Image: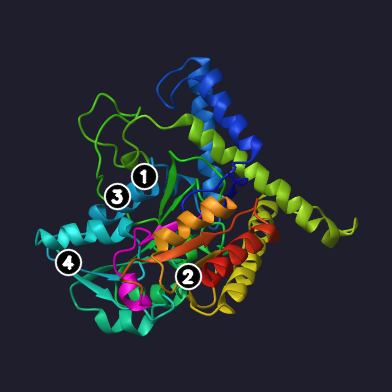
Amino acid sequence: MPSRRYLDHAATSWPKPPEVVAAWQRAALVIGATAGRGLYAASREATAIRERARAAAARLLGDVAPERVALPAGCTLALNMAIHGLARPGDHLIATAADHNATLRPLHRLAERGLIELSIVPCDATGRVDPAAIAAAWRPATRLAVISHVSNVTGVAQDIAAVADIAHARGGLLVLDAAQSLGVVPCDTPGWGADVVAAPAHKWLQGMAGVAMLWARPGVDPEPLVQGGTGTLSESLEMPAAFPARMEAGSPDVPALAAVEAAFRWLAARGLEATAAERAGCKPAPTEDRLAARGLEAMAAASRRLADGLAGRLGELRGVRVIGGTRAAGIVSFVVEGYDPAEVAAILEQAAGVEVRAGFHCAACIHEFLGTKAGGTVRAAFGPANDAADVEAVAATVESIRAG
């Protein structure tokens, strides 16, 4: 079996940085307590880990207020919390064909039950959505637009600033799925201008599964989807009214929270490497926040270069079609004439140890517009551990498939 070449970073990052794994293990093996549930030393430390992770997440989301960042168990849960917590009976909601099932399925469920009306606006053959189509779909009863920032199929980014302007000019709200963009698209304004943002820790941020980030701007307070213990106001049967406690029922995953904090430090270290030449010894050292952002920028740029390189190589092969256009993330989707995507993925693993994803990528609507309804695509998603040899392994193997 060839050595392992992992190219599925759009699903989850791997290998995790050693510092992240070490922090995760220490929280599980040494601390072993939950956050916000006790006054003994280990529980206090767990609580401190949670709050430091919250502060790190707030900085990554555009230096928002930490008290507006909830830390649910996953991005899909966070998006369900936002959608179910903000939609009201009789509302009209807007989504896009480029979105992930993490938003499309809860929206479809609400529409199927007759609680809302739903419009899904189209995308083009690259996965891009024209903001004008969202404006055209808006109705007097429209309350929310829900959109995936970067397509997990094509890596193409949407014009979130334009969509936010459309929603706000009409008195509506924008819920943003940032699963593929936090860590890839710079967040220089709070939540990219959206009203609610959900993002996981285990993808481009290099953390572990088990925790996500749900930010809501002040004045936007979704009704709690999940009720239960929060460690606060335990004498009452009512959920706490204040954000973020209202969104954090149940015991948090302390090891995953420790990994968030460690990942932030790891990213800052990468940023220090990236800015060493720029500082030239005479400029003030950047802040840790700026270093972490710089580390993310450097990783994203490197991943895009690899993806662009692979897209260029594959585009030269007869019978191979590369999907998408200008990519924000290091994602390349393609199809090989005469082969099901699952067959191509199996050959890549068997022949070259390349691990990619094949199929529809949890995106139910986009393939109609990409021309890939028959079987989806082969998707290669690059991360910080990948290099030019991985590009060569994919390109050479696909070339051999076509030659065979």
- Please report whichever mark, 4 or 3, sits nearer to the chain's N-terminal start: 3
Q: Nearer the viewer, residue 380 or 273?
A: 380
Residue 119 spot, x, y in % from top left: 22, 73
Q: CA distance from mark 2 to mark 3?
A: 33 Å
Q: Is residue 11 visible?
A: yes
Callout 2: few (<14), some (14-19), or many (20+) C-alpha neighbours within 10 Å? Answer: many
Sequence-wise, the earlier of marks 1 and 3 is 3
| Element at label 4 | loop
Q: Residue at x 68, y 54 (%)?
A: 295
- Which residue is at 53% across, 57% downward? 348
Q: Residue 59: give x, y in percent of width and height.
A: 57, 51
Please name the amino acid that badge 3 sits on. Answer: Met
Q: Which residue is mark 2?
A: 334
Per the image, the residue denoted by label 3 is 81
Magenta range: 355-371
Can you say whether 242 is above or below 40 in the image? below
Contact check, label 2 and label 3, Cβ < 8 Å: no
Label of residue 243 in the image: 1
Query: In the image, what residue type sits under mark 1?
Result: Phe
**Which residue matches tag 4?**
91
**In the rendered structure, are the residues bearing label 2 and label 4 in contact, judged by CB atoms less than 8 Å apart?**
no
- Residue at 49 percent across and 35 percent down: it is 256
Which percent across, then down, holds residue 225? 24, 45
Mark 1 or 3: the one toward you: 3
